[in-house]
């Protein structure tokens, strides 16, 4: 296992639609374990998508610090969402120092494969539903800043570039 460096915005890989995983072997399980180690290496992080550690494949790991605990998913897909959108401030390891208020569905049904290659379905609500949507967004090249209005997004982009120049 290894702790990976986190890829930061505006790296191109964060904007790619990640490739589906075809075979699930020891290699993919090792990648997932290293992603888990990387996630736990940061106290506040509750989820990580493979692009954030520079892997262009559809893997996510989540631990929303709830009774469900650690989840490792391969090729996750949102099958259904339910309920009126709820807003909450979200952060992202790839966008340090920024939070964005994001409207998301309170309930989701996600289909994925587990580490053993079995098809599983997760039906959940609340915070875990939100984290699942955030991480699956990553696999589709979508980031929290995409939920900003156009004006706010333009301001963000100017400020972010300035900060990077200064640091
Ligand atoms: Ni993120």
Image (tube, rainbow, N blue to C red):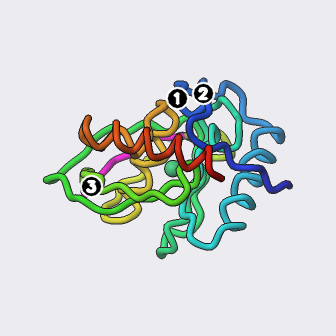
Residue 109 lies left or right of residue 14; in this view the side is left
What is the secondary structure assignment of the residue under circle 2? Answer: helix
Query: Which numbered tag is attached to residue 15?
Result: 1
Q: What separation in Å lies between label 3 and label 2 (alpha carbons)?
A: 30 Å
Q: Earlier in the sequence, mark 1 or mark 3?
A: 1
Looking at the picture, how far across and down is residue 147, in whole percent?
30, 42
Residue extending farthest to the front is 166
Mark 3 and mark 2 in contact? Answer it, CB < 8 Å. Answer: no
Query: Which numbered tag is attached to residue 120?
Result: none
Mark 1 and mark 2 in contact? Answer it, CB < 8 Å. Answer: yes
Label 3 sits on residue: 107
Q: In which quadrant will I find the N terminus?
A: bottom right
Query: Closer to us: mark 3 or mark 2?
Result: 2
What is the secondary structure assignment of the residue under circle 1? Answer: helix
In this view, the residue in front, 23 or 59, is: 59
Residue at x 54% of width, y 63% of height = 46
């Amino acid at each position: 296992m290894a702790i990976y460096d986190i890829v930061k915005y505006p790296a191109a890989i964060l904007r790619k639609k990640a490739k589906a995983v075809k075979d699930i072997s020891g290699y993919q399980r090792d990648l997932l374990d290293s992603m888990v180690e990387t996630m736990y290496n940061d106290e506040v992080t509750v989820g990580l998508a493979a692009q954030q550690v520079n892997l262009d494949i559809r893997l996510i790991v989540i631990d929303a610090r709830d009774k469900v605990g650690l989840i490792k998913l391969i090729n996750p897909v949102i099958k259904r969402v339910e309920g009126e959108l709820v807003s909450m401030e979200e952060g992202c390891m790839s966008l340090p120092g920024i939070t964005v208020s994001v409207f998301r569905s309170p309930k989701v049904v996600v289909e994925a494969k587990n580490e053993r290659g079995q098809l599983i379905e997760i039906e959940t609500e609340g915070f875990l539903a939100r984290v699942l949507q955030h991480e699956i967004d990553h696999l589709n090249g979508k980031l929290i800043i995409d939920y900003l209005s156009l004006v706010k997004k333009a301001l963000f982009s100017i400020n972010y570039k300035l900060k990077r120049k200064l640091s």
